[in-house]
Image: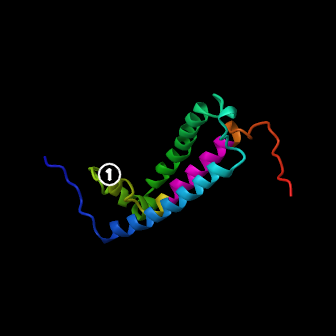
Amino acid sequence: KPVFQHKINATDVAYLIVNSTVEYVFALQISHLLWFAPLVVRAPTSLSLLNGPLAFWMLLVVDDMLYAPLHRAMHLQAVYRWVHKHHHRNTFPARGYIDAANEHPVEQIAALCLHWVAVHVVAHTAGGGGAGRPRQRASL
């Protein structure tokens, strides 16, 4: 049985343009957060097992814990028809980014918001200025 791969149409192109723009803005925001946030350790001498490899592992776990219920909610009949169905049209994702980002913009924004929350949760629990450490005020 030959593999079916749907043709890219105008809706796909529109979603890809919107999602690429949203991802670009998100990448700028997350880069700014990681570079300037006092909760994120950047000095090599301040890195430890907790705020290095363990924080990275926690980020993956927290992100999945947040995303799994969102993805399940996307399968509710009211949401699936209008938002998530577009994602499931793709049955053979072999075109790289074109297939990966070809989802409804609402789904894209919801997922990126959860990534943002996951970064904050991990930064507050395992980051350099997180759990148990008082925040320092900037001097004027």
Residue at (52, 47) in percent of width and height: 67
Instruction: Based on the picture, tell me whether residue 43 belongs to the magenta stretch.
Output: no
Figure quadrant of the C terminus:
bottom right
Magenta span contains residue 116:
yes
Stretch of the chain drawn in magenta: 109-123
Q: Which residue is mark 1?
A: 96
Residue in the picture at 63% in, 50% down: 35
Residue 129 coordinates in the image, percent (x, y): 74, 41
The residue that appears at 80% across and 38% down in the rendered structure is: 133
- As drawn, 12 above or below 33: below
Left or right of 91 in this view: 16: right
Above or below: residue 50 compared with residue 36: above
Q: Residue at x 40, y 67 (%)?
A: 17
Residue 139, image x, y percentages = 86, 54
Write down the quadrant of residue 15 in the picture: bottom left
Q: Measuring from the top left, give residue 93's x and y in whole percent.
A: 29, 50
Q: Is residue 85 above or below residue 127?
A: below
